[in-house]
Image: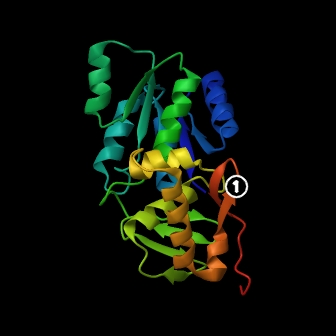
Protein backbone atom coordinates (compact mmCIF):
# COMPACT_ATOMS: atom_id res chain seq x y z
CA UNK A 1 0.00 0.00 0.00
CA UNK A 2 1.22 3.54 -0.78
CA UNK A 3 2.57 5.54 2.16
CA UNK A 4 3.25 9.17 3.06
CA UNK A 5 6.54 10.08 4.72
CA UNK A 6 6.34 12.82 7.36
CA UNK A 7 9.74 14.35 8.22
CA UNK A 8 9.05 16.53 11.26
CA UNK A 9 11.07 16.84 14.48
CA UNK A 10 8.43 18.59 16.62
CA UNK A 11 6.55 15.75 18.38
CA UNK A 12 3.22 17.59 18.69
CA UNK A 13 3.22 18.63 15.02
CA UNK A 14 4.25 15.14 13.93
CA UNK A 15 1.39 13.68 15.98
CA UNK A 16 -1.18 16.10 14.54
CA UNK A 17 -0.08 15.35 10.97
CA UNK A 18 0.01 11.60 11.53
CA UNK A 19 -3.46 11.46 13.10
CA UNK A 20 -4.94 13.62 10.34
CA UNK A 21 -3.39 11.60 7.50
CA UNK A 22 -4.52 8.30 9.01
CA UNK A 23 -8.01 9.70 9.53
CA UNK A 24 -8.07 10.56 5.82
CA UNK A 25 -7.23 6.94 5.00
CA UNK A 26 -3.48 7.06 4.32
CA UNK A 27 -0.59 4.95 5.59
CA UNK A 28 2.04 7.07 7.36
CA UNK A 29 5.72 6.63 8.23
CA UNK A 30 7.57 9.24 10.29
CA UNK A 31 11.10 10.58 10.70
CA UNK A 32 12.39 13.20 13.15
CA UNK A 33 15.50 14.20 11.22
CA UNK A 34 16.90 14.54 7.72
CA UNK A 35 19.04 11.45 8.25
CA UNK A 36 16.07 9.32 9.35
CA UNK A 37 14.03 10.54 6.40
CA UNK A 38 16.79 9.73 3.90
CA UNK A 39 17.22 6.26 5.43
CA UNK A 40 13.48 5.51 5.13
CA UNK A 41 13.45 6.61 1.50
CA UNK A 42 16.30 4.21 0.73
CA UNK A 43 14.70 1.37 2.68
CA UNK A 44 11.09 1.63 1.50
CA UNK A 45 9.67 1.65 -2.02
CA UNK A 46 6.04 2.37 -1.07
CA UNK A 47 6.44 6.08 -0.26
CA UNK A 48 4.44 8.24 -2.69
CA UNK A 49 4.52 11.67 -1.00
CA UNK A 50 6.84 13.53 1.40
CA UNK A 51 5.76 16.13 3.98
CA UNK A 52 9.01 17.87 4.85
CA UNK A 53 9.77 20.31 7.66
CA UNK A 54 12.49 22.86 6.91
CA UNK A 55 13.86 23.30 10.42
CA UNK A 56 15.30 19.87 11.17
CA UNK A 57 17.91 19.18 13.87
CA UNK A 58 20.51 17.98 11.37
CA UNK A 59 19.98 20.59 8.67
CA UNK A 60 17.63 22.48 6.38
CA UNK A 61 14.89 20.24 4.97
CA UNK A 62 15.45 21.81 1.56
CA UNK A 63 18.73 19.88 1.34
CA UNK A 64 16.70 16.66 1.46
CA UNK A 65 14.40 18.03 -1.21
CA UNK A 66 17.28 18.86 -3.53
CA UNK A 67 18.73 15.40 -3.00
CA UNK A 68 15.37 13.79 -3.79
CA UNK A 69 14.90 15.80 -6.95
CA UNK A 70 18.38 15.03 -8.31
CA UNK A 71 18.11 11.28 -7.65
CA UNK A 72 16.48 9.45 -10.60
CA UNK A 73 14.94 6.95 -8.18
CA UNK A 74 13.04 9.59 -6.17
CA UNK A 75 12.82 12.70 -8.35
CA UNK A 76 9.18 11.98 -9.19
CA UNK A 77 8.09 12.05 -5.52
CA UNK A 78 5.93 15.10 -4.70
CA UNK A 79 7.26 17.16 -1.77
CA UNK A 80 5.19 19.47 0.43
CA UNK A 81 7.44 21.75 2.49
CA UNK A 82 6.14 22.76 5.94
CA UNK A 83 7.71 25.88 7.42
CA UNK A 84 7.16 28.92 9.62
CA UNK A 85 8.94 31.06 7.00
CA UNK A 86 6.52 33.03 4.85
CA UNK A 87 8.57 35.69 3.06
CA UNK A 88 8.72 35.69 -0.73
CA UNK A 89 12.42 34.78 -0.70
CA UNK A 90 11.64 31.76 1.48
CA UNK A 91 8.93 30.57 -0.92
CA UNK A 92 11.27 31.03 -3.88
CA UNK A 93 13.93 28.94 -2.11
CA UNK A 94 11.33 26.22 -1.57
CA UNK A 95 10.42 26.04 -5.25
CA UNK A 96 14.03 26.36 -6.43
CA UNK A 97 14.82 23.26 -4.39
CA UNK A 98 12.31 21.32 -6.50
CA UNK A 99 9.51 21.16 -3.93
CA UNK A 100 5.93 21.12 -5.19
CA UNK A 101 4.12 23.05 -2.44
CA UNK A 102 5.14 25.60 0.25
CA UNK A 103 2.82 25.51 3.27
CA UNK A 104 3.25 27.94 6.15
CA UNK A 105 2.81 26.86 9.76
CA UNK A 106 0.46 26.63 11.56
CA UNK A 107 -0.74 24.24 8.88
CA UNK A 108 -4.33 24.46 7.66
CA UNK A 109 -5.47 20.83 7.78
CA UNK A 110 -8.34 21.32 5.25
CA UNK A 111 -5.85 22.84 2.79
CA UNK A 112 -3.30 20.11 3.46
CA UNK A 113 -5.98 17.46 2.93
CA UNK A 114 -6.76 18.83 -0.54
CA UNK A 115 -3.09 18.94 -1.56
CA UNK A 116 -2.44 15.42 -0.24
CA UNK A 117 -5.48 14.00 -2.07
CA UNK A 118 -4.37 15.70 -5.29
CA UNK A 119 -0.87 14.21 -5.17
CA UNK A 120 -1.91 10.75 -3.99
CA UNK A 121 -4.55 10.49 -6.73
CA UNK A 122 -2.40 11.96 -9.49
CA UNK A 123 -1.71 9.81 -12.51
CA UNK A 124 2.08 9.88 -13.14
CA UNK A 125 3.42 11.87 -16.04
CA UNK A 126 4.80 9.92 -18.98
CA UNK A 127 8.42 9.01 -18.25
CA UNK A 128 8.10 9.93 -14.56
CA UNK A 129 9.27 6.54 -13.39
CA UNK A 130 8.46 2.87 -13.61
CA UNK A 131 7.39 2.42 -9.99
CA UNK A 132 4.70 -0.20 -9.57
CA UNK A 133 1.41 0.52 -7.88
CA UNK A 134 -0.07 -2.44 -6.02
CA UNK A 135 -3.62 -2.93 -4.80
CA UNK A 136 -4.41 -6.44 -3.63
CA UNK A 137 -3.61 -8.83 -6.48
CA UNK A 138 -3.43 -5.93 -8.95
CA UNK A 139 -0.05 -4.49 -10.02
CA UNK A 140 0.23 -1.51 -12.37
CA UNK A 141 3.34 -0.22 -14.14
CA UNK A 142 2.50 3.38 -15.14
CA UNK A 143 5.44 3.97 -17.47
CA UNK A 144 4.76 0.85 -19.50
CA UNK A 145 0.97 1.21 -19.12
CA UNK A 146 0.93 -2.44 -18.12
CA UNK A 147 -1.47 -4.19 -15.73
CA UNK A 148 -1.02 -7.54 -14.01
CA UNK A 149 -3.48 -9.41 -11.82
CA UNK A 150 -1.97 -12.21 -9.76
CA UNK A 151 1.02 -12.13 -12.11
CA UNK A 152 -1.19 -12.50 -15.22
CA UNK A 153 -0.69 -9.71 -17.76
CA UNK A 154 -3.77 -7.91 -19.10
CA UNK A 155 -2.98 -7.46 -22.78
CA UNK A 156 -3.92 -4.56 -25.07
CA UNK A 157 -5.36 -2.30 -22.38
CA UNK A 158 -5.96 1.13 -24.00
CA UNK A 159 -4.29 4.11 -22.27
CA UNK A 160 -7.61 5.63 -21.18
CA UNK A 161 -8.73 2.38 -19.57
CA UNK A 162 -5.32 1.94 -17.95
CA UNK A 163 -5.58 5.44 -16.46
CA UNK A 164 -9.06 4.60 -15.18
CA UNK A 165 -7.80 1.39 -13.58
CA UNK A 166 -4.78 3.22 -12.12
CA UNK A 167 -6.92 5.94 -10.54
CA UNK A 168 -9.24 3.38 -8.97
CA UNK A 169 -6.30 1.31 -7.70
CA UNK A 170 -4.56 4.36 -6.23
CA UNK A 171 -7.47 4.71 -3.76
CA UNK A 172 -6.70 1.24 -2.35
CA UNK A 173 -10.32 0.08 -2.17
CA UNK A 174 -11.88 3.44 -1.31
CA UNK A 175 -14.71 4.84 -3.43
CA UNK A 176 -13.98 7.19 -6.32
CA UNK A 177 -16.96 9.32 -7.29
CA UNK A 178 -18.11 9.64 -10.87
CA UNK A 179 -17.49 13.38 -10.63
CA UNK A 180 -13.86 12.81 -9.59
CA UNK A 181 -13.31 10.41 -12.49
CA UNK A 182 -14.79 12.91 -14.94
CA UNK A 183 -12.56 15.72 -13.63
CA UNK A 184 -9.33 13.75 -13.53
CA UNK A 185 -9.67 11.66 -16.69
CA UNK A 186 -11.83 13.80 -18.98
CA UNK A 187 -11.23 17.29 -17.62
CA UNK A 188 -14.90 17.64 -16.68
CA UNK A 189 -16.05 17.51 -20.30
CA UNK A 190 -18.19 14.35 -20.42
CA UNK A 191 -21.44 13.06 -18.93
CA UNK A 192 -21.81 10.39 -16.24
CA UNK A 193 -22.83 7.89 -18.90
CA UNK A 194 -19.35 8.07 -20.48
CA UNK A 195 -17.83 6.89 -17.20
CA UNK A 196 -20.30 3.99 -17.01
CA UNK A 197 -19.41 3.01 -20.58
CA UNK A 198 -15.67 3.13 -19.80
CA UNK A 199 -16.16 1.01 -16.67
CA UNK A 200 -18.07 -1.52 -18.78
CA UNK A 201 -15.27 -1.58 -21.39
CA UNK A 202 -12.67 -2.02 -18.66
CA UNK A 203 -14.54 -5.01 -17.24
CA UNK A 204 -14.81 -6.51 -20.72
CA UNK A 205 -11.06 -6.14 -21.20
CA UNK A 206 -10.40 -7.82 -17.87
CA UNK A 207 -12.74 -10.70 -18.71
CA UNK A 208 -15.69 -12.29 -16.90
CA UNK A 209 -13.68 -13.40 -13.86
CA UNK A 210 -11.21 -10.55 -13.40
CA UNK A 211 -13.88 -7.98 -14.25
CA UNK A 212 -15.34 -8.64 -10.79
CA UNK A 213 -12.35 -6.68 -9.45
CA UNK A 214 -14.21 -3.44 -10.31
CA UNK A 215 -17.07 -2.61 -7.97
CA UNK A 216 -20.01 -0.28 -8.66
CA UNK A 217 -21.25 1.38 -5.48
CA UNK A 218 -24.62 3.07 -5.95
CA UNK A 219 -24.48 6.72 -5.01
CA UNK A 220 -20.75 6.58 -4.21
CA UNK A 221 -19.04 5.77 -7.50
CA UNK A 222 -16.60 2.94 -8.20
CA UNK A 223 -13.79 1.15 -6.41
CA UNK A 224 -11.29 -1.70 -6.62
CA UNK A 225 -12.00 -4.75 -4.50
CA UNK A 226 -8.64 -4.88 -2.67
CA UNK A 227 -9.51 -8.32 -1.26
CA UNK A 228 -10.43 -9.76 -4.67
CA UNK A 229 -9.41 -13.30 -5.54
CA UNK A 230 -10.31 -14.82 -8.93
CA UNK A 231 -12.78 -17.73 -8.61
CA UNK A 232 -10.24 -20.06 -10.21
CA UNK A 233 -7.29 -18.86 -8.10
Q: Nearer the viewer, residue 118 or 30?
A: 118
Q: Is residue 33 visible?
A: no
Q: Position of residue 223 (x, y in %)?
A: 63, 57
Give left or right: position of 61 versus 30: left
Secondary element under disc 1, as helix, strand or loop, is: strand
Q: Nearer the viewer, residue 71 or 177?
A: 177
Q: Is residue 188 visible?
A: yes
Q: Position of residue 182 (x, y in %)?
A: 47, 49
Give left or right: position of 88 versus 168: left
Give left or right: position of 200 versus 127: right
Mark 1 = which residue? 217
Name the colouring of the figure.
rainbow
For mark 1, does the 10 Å Cα neighbourhood hold few (<14), some (14 to 19), or many (20 or more) residues?
Answer: few
Identified at 65% across, 70% down, the residue is 213
Identified at 53% across, 51% down, the residue is 192
Q: Nearer the viewer, residue 143 or 179?
A: 179
Where 26 falls versus 45 (above or below)?
A: above
Amino acid sequence: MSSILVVEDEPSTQKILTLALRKWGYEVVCAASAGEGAALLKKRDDIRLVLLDRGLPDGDGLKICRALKTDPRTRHLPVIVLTGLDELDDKLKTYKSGADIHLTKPISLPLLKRYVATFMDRIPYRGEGADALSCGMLTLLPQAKKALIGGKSIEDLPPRLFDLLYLLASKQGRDVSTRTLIQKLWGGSVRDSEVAVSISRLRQRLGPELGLLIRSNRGRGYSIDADFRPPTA
